[in-house]
């Protein structure tokens, strides 16, 4: 399973980069994961061609508990070779991109800065893998 986290916009603060690297390092024991930063929506289309299954993170998407997300992720791992998660920039994503998503996931109905949502999502991805593997982390 290859996971790509597509991010429109860049992490600018050192502490956010450190947090991202922390979770990326922890996730390496479960999967191959890479982060690809993209300047804007228009350049996303080039990258989407390489995605097997596209999951868009959007406040209007389906909310899942951590355990339900782990179950969803496990099903995708069994049926997909490449899994892409897309996080929009400060303006979100264009409607055209939303239509291309195979699944739209919401981490919360609250609005978060796009840079911070990257870290929150990586933590939830790590949490999901620990649930799948039965590793004590999720309480």
Image (tube, rainbow, N blue to C red):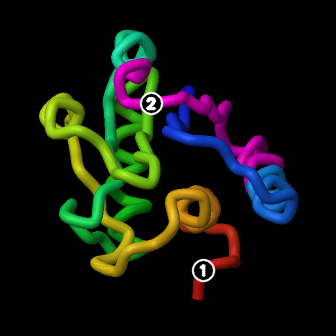
The crowd level at tag 1 (other Cα within 10 Å; few <14, some 14-19, many 20+) is some
Q: Position of residue 13 (x, y in %)?
A: 79, 58
Query: Quadrant of the image for the N terminus?
Result: top right
Residue at 34%, 17% in the rendered image: 45
Q: Position of residue 139 (x, y in %)?
A: 58, 88
Q: Nearer the viewer, residue 42 or 56?
A: 42
What residue is disc 1 on?
A: 138
Q: Which residues are magenta?
A: 23-44
What residue is disc 2 on?
A: 40
Residue at 69%, 77% in the rendered image: 136
Q: Tell me: 59 left or right of 37.
A: left
Quarter of the image holding residue 4? top right
Q: Position of residue 135 (x, y in %)?
A: 68, 69
Mark closer to the chain start, 2 or 1: 2
Q: CA distance from mark 2 to mark 1?
A: 35 Å
Task: Please say whether residue 61 is one of the residues in the magenta stretch.
Answer: no
Quarter of the image holding residue 37? top right
Task: Please say whether residue 34 is one of the residues in the magenta stretch.
Answer: yes
In the structure shown, which secondary structural element does the residue marked by tag 1 occupy? loop
Q: Nearer the viewer, residue 69 or 59?
A: 59
């Amino acid at each position: 399973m290859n996971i790509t986290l597509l991010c429109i916009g860049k992490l600018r603060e050192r502490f956010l980069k450190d947090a991202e690297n922390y979770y990326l390092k922890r996730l390496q024991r479960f999967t191959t994961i890479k982060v690809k930063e993209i300047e804007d929506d228009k350049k996303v289309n080039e990258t989407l061609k390489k995605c097997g299954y596209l999951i868009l993170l959007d406040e209007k998407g389906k909310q899942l508990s951590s355990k339900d997300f782990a179950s969803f992720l496990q099903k995708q791992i069994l049926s997909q070779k490449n899994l892409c998660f897309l996080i929009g920039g400060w303006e979100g994503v264009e409607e055209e991109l939303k239509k291309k998503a195979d699944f739209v996931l919401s981490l919360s109905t609250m609005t978060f800065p796009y840079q911070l949502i990257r870290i929150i999502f990586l933590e939830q991805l790590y949490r999901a893998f620990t649930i799948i593997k039965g590793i004590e982390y999720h309480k």
